Image (cartoon, grey):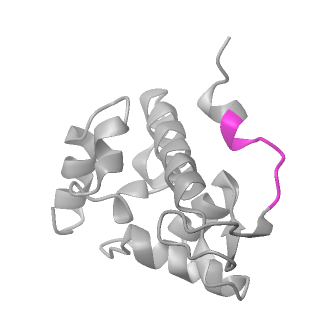
Amino acid sequence: MAKSWSEKFNNGRVPEIETCQKSFGGVPAEKKFIISTPKEIDSYIQTIPEGHYVSFQKMKQDISNQYEVGFMCPLTAGIFIRNVAELAFENYSKNQKIKEITPYWRVIDLKIPLVKKLSFGSDFVKEMRQVEGLPL
């Protein structure tokens, strides 16, 4: 049986610094990168004020800077931000108020490929970005 979004979010992992063996997803060979966690990405997004947008790339750079490495793992960053969005939407669907869920739409815009992978589609992302006056 597949894990729930909550189980994936609460996976018990801690951030890890690795060295890239060969160039991958914009991370050059021999460079250090951070493998973050869904909780860390969730915490980062929660610091973004209402009505503000931080690009996915900027989020990755900000988190990698905290660890004094140049990069964040591009694969896990996408997986983990999707986990954050899916869990937030799931909680919203269970009657949690908008102000109580992680505002992932402040990082996910309609132009990044990740939005097409969301199980609930892009309409809610679009709606919330419009509500906050963010670019689509």
In this picture, is 136 found above or below 66? Answer: above
Q: Is residue 115 magenta?
A: no
Can residue 123 be seen here? The reply is: yes
Residue 43 location (% of width, % of height): 63, 65
Horizontal placement of 54 versus 65: left or right? left
Front residue (pair 20, 126): 20
Q: Main secondary structure of the magenta part?
A: loop
Q: Residue at x 46, y 45 (%)?
A: 85
Q: Residue at x 61, y 84 (%)?
A: 70
Residue 79 location (% of width, % of height): 54, 46
Q: Residue at x 71, y 32 (%)?
A: 7
Where does the magenta region start and end? 8-14
Front residue (pair 26, 23): 23
In this picture, is 59 found above or below 121? Answer: below
Can residue 48 be seen here? The reply is: no
Q: Residue at x 58, y 70 (%)?
A: 44
